[in-house]
Image: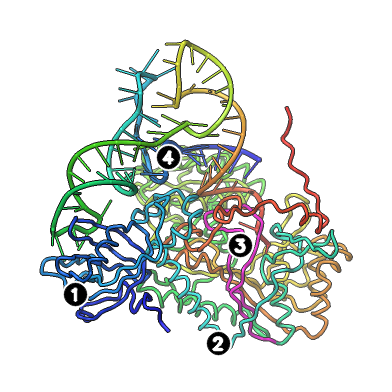
Amino acid sequence: MRADWQRTIGCGDVRAEHVGTIITVNGWANSVRDHGQVVFVDLRDRTGVVQIVCDPARNPEAAAAFEDAKKVRNEYALSITAKVVKRQDGMENPLLATGAIELEAVTFRILNTAKTLPFQLDQDASSTNEELRLKYRYLDLRRPEMYRKMKLRHDIVRAVREYFYANDFLEIETPVLTKSSPEGARDYLVPYRLEPGLFYALPQAPQQFKQLLMVGGIDRYFQIAKCFRDESQRADRQPEFTQVDLEMGFATQEDVLSLVEGLMIEVVTKFSGETGKHVSGNPFPRFTYDEALARYGTDKPDIRFELELVDCAQIFASTEFGVFRQVIDNGGQVKCIRYPNGARIPRREMDELVNLARETGAKGMSYVLVEDDGVGFRGTLAKFVTDVERPLIIEATGAQAGDLIGFIADKPSVVAKVLDRIRRFIGTKLNLIDTSKMAYCWVTDFPVFEEDETSGGLTFAHNPFAMPREEHLGWFETDPLAMRAQCYDLVCNGSESASGAVRIHIPEIQLEVFRKMGLSPEQIEQRFGHMLEAFRFGAPPHAGIAPGLDRLVMLLCDEDNIREVIAFPKMGGGYDPLMDAPSTVEDTQLAELGLTVTVKEEAAE
RNA sequence: GGAGGAGUAGCUCAGUCGGUUAGAGCGCCGCCCUGUCACGGCGGAGGUCGCGGGUUCGAGCCCCGUCUUCUCCGCCA
């Protein structure tokens, strides 16, 4: 049963066809314009804005409404029953969807008053202090642009669910209170009251549970899952975030890739009218990890623009330029990138470029500028380039008159990192990026192991549960660093969009990986005994992946900050200014958990 | 942990070479106004210049420290 003050229609939904009817709308006073003998109130709800007019001269029986309207301030919660009338000629407002009509108030109810807001909703959100916006997020959310983002996120989640339902997946929840696994990111811990000293951890991902669901015969599982990682934040990272987690039994890498390609194409295409974004490339291009690093210097290449890296080791095989000579002789790399029209950039930008290289780890950057004839070189490196090398460089890079070619010589990891950074710098500087594109690509075959810089031993490069390529299974002892895994990242516009793998389902192989990582039999048993045990009961081959939801929504909303697409996000240190969390707890709560708190001492001088 | 940017009225910002009483727009309060729609007019209130110390005759401005915040690096299976 509708109370008499409850809405019969949304503010933004009133149209000329309603003229003559009596309606009731609910919402907030968006603005009040008091002209003395007539008052206009713009009423806003999530559907839009409509103009209410209170004019006792035209509507003598609504004198009370007029008096109330004069009391209204911005953001009062109102209920107005009114007659829909066509606006007088010349009074229409083409800026409003409801601009052809207005509402002549009959009954005017102030449901609640409002203090003056700490910031104005009619100004651009991006120009308001973000801490303030988050502290009063419930007010910030009243902005139409925030509603639009929340609505789009909802619609995307809905489309994702429908896609998985249609593909015969079961949506299953997994625990949030679970076991710490010390590898990977830092865990959030939850003390266990019944036995002080024991802890749950919040899951960094439902990884182990979804594999166990495959052992359990669920076969096709998905979940919109919260994940928790206690690591430093970035513009595109939150301590708690959402993944579209999925796993498939008796499945191959191809099954997962084609399923996720279908998902992304469907979701992006479904909303492209609204977002202006479209998928570029179908099927998605694929690179092995080694190939991506060679061509782009990164395992998450932004392929919205070209400018690939060029390996010059062959060209400079017999160079006498000391820097290159030394790097090549020590097994390093010499690679370069073309900067179209870079020979014409001002000195300041040139310095910026070299500084960028230094900041990223290079000792410096050599470069040549291609002369107007398209053949000759100028620049720091020009005098060291022989007549034989010069045309080879031009051919390999495709350089043209007026281009700059920047060279980095160092160990492979530095060369890749620096040139990736420079490549993205050039892409941005030259405006090569088409922001309407969702340029997806797959990066596959990551190394199984990499050297752990802190311990000196081996650690996993991608995921400890990723199945090595079958032809590499014999390399555990001989050349573990050369082993490649059956795993894959989905990359979109230069950021990681999803990460997954064909999982190890043979206990002996999983054991071998753990051993190689330097885990003792006791550690393996304590941390992963349950997984290995499960694999011994006929675990099926299985594979899965987990696309990040927040970043997908962020890209589709054209936002560069993940907090913009989360209703109640946390700030830099994981602080939530709305709830004032984290915060202290009562001593009795600590005592019950057997915890004592050691306050951080200031370093005394 | 490191680098850089920011912090001045409720909000967004300006503030010259260190010099009188720190300003603007919006918002807020009061009065006026019958057609506005970011209404308009008149009047008004509102400041520990993040905090602490220092230099100086004098500090919003210079120096040191500190806090908060943003971006990036490290970190993020």
Q: Earlier in the sequence, mark 1 or mark 3?
A: 1
Q: Are marks 3 and 4 on the same chain?
A: yes
Q: How far apart are marks 3 and 2 (CA)?
A: 28 Å
Mark 1: give few (<14), some (14-19) or many (20+) Cα within 10 Å. Answer: some
Q: Which of the 4 image quarters holds residue A200?
A: bottom right
Q: Residue shown at 59%/82% (left/top)?
A: A255
Report the residue marked by disc 4: A350
Local secondary structure at mark 2:
loop
Q: Distance between the residues labelled 1 and 3?
A: 49 Å
* Picture disc at residue A276: none
Q: How far apart are marks 4 and 1 (CA)?
A: 64 Å
Q: Tell me the distance, in whole angstroms, between the alpha carbons under discs 3 and 4.
A: 40 Å
**Residue at numbered disc 1:** A85
Residue under label 3: A240
Picture disc at residue A167: 2
Q: Would you place residue B33 above or below residue A180 in this image?
A: above
Q: Nearer the viewer, mark 3 or mark 2?
A: 3
Separation of marks 1 and 2 at Cα, in angstroms:
50 Å
Chain holding disc 4:
A
